[in-house]
Image: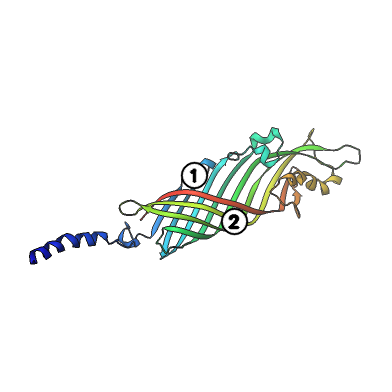
Amino acid sequence: MRRIFTLLLTVLLPLSLAGQKTKFTPEHWGLVDGKTVIKANITSPIFRNYSVAVERVLGRGLGLQLGANIMPRGPLPLVPAGGALQMESEWVNFFSLSSFSLTPELRWYTGGGYGHGFYLMGYWRYERYRVGDYGYHFDLERLPNGTVPQGSAVLSGKLDTYSLGMGLGAQWLFGRNKNIVLDWNILGAHIGRGKLGADVVYHLQGGGQLPAESRETASRDILAPLSDLAFLNFDGARGELDEANSTVRAQGIGTPWAFFRMSLSVGFRF
């Protein structure tokens, strides 16, 4: 009888222990302390963007992330520039765009996971766009002699945006030590404001300079075609001609700002 009991214990005890699931905590599996994740967005290169993020597990169900994104200078990704910005067709090839952004983000893992599971996020985003070589034509007011000066202009400047956003996603840990990370940002949206600062270099058709009596209204007329850009709020815009009478510095041009956010990232937990 004793031998049978001993045999049962020998067989059943290992099975019982094997059936117990070890509760995951970062310290048990991390290379350092298990609470830091470095990720790269694998979908952003489609849009000529390169994005990385570092997430720190603050505790059960809570994480803090900082993301950075850069887009090198080039044409508007995947979008015909003339159709998107209502440009004159002869200027499309000269348009260029680059950007840089920083995104602090707070995550709440609804299941109480340590950096894994379904999550809700709240974030703030700063993004700077640099616009170069955006060209257009303009007409000035009729002069006393009856002529209407015409010319061309090229705008180069920067658009700074500041936004607040919310979203949802899911993050999984894979591998023997749960160090491989897959982060699916299912959907996020942010809204805010943007402000454009730019220099517009212009040339009058046929050369020459503006007559003195036209200079007060010339800056307004030179900037007027920018109001056709759908994303700009031109109310309150103003311009100032420089002493050389060939550049207008655009000021006071703002825009409401809204954007969607989706991504798929892979990373490693340390």
The residue wearing badge 1 is 43
Of callouts 1 and 2, the N-terminal one:
1
Q: Residues within 10 Å of mark 2 (few under 14, many from 20)?
A: some
Q: Residues within 10 Å of mark 1 (few under 14, many from 20)?
A: some
Local SS, label 1: loop
The residue wearing badge 2 is 190
Would you say the residues marked 1 and 2 are in contact, meaning their CB atoms lie under 8 Å apart?
A: no
- Calculate the distance from the C-alpha at mark 1 to the C-alpha at mark 2: 19 Å
Q: Is residue 196 above or below residue 93?
A: below
Which kind of residue does numbered mark 2 sit on?
His
Q: Indicate which disc residue 132 carries.
A: none
- The reply, left or right, for residue 167 in relation to residue 91 is left
The N terminus, quarter of image:
bottom left
Q: Where residue 159 appears, x then y in whole percent?
A: 64, 50
Q: Quadrant of residue 228?
A: top right
Q: Where residue 170 appears, x then y in whole percent?
A: 46, 55
Of residue 131 and residue 11, the one placed in the foreground of this image is 11
Local SS, label 2: strand
Q: Where residue 194 appears, x then y in whole percent?
A: 65, 54
- The reply, left or right, for residue 120 in relation to residue 33 is right
- The reply, left or right, for residue 39 in relation to residue 8 is right
Residue for point 30% across, 52% down = 176
Of residue 81 and residue 225, the one placed in the foreground of this image is 81
Q: Residue furthest right?
A: 145
Of residue 120 and residue 20, the one placed in the foreground of this image is 20
Q: Residue furthest front?
A: 1
Residue for point 88% across, 41% down = 143
Q: Is residue 267 above or below residue 73?
A: below
Which kind of residue does numbered mark 1 sit on?
Thr
Q: Is residue 221 above or below residue 104?
A: above
The C terminus, quarter of image:
bottom left
Q: Where residue 16 appears, x then y in whole percent?
A: 23, 62
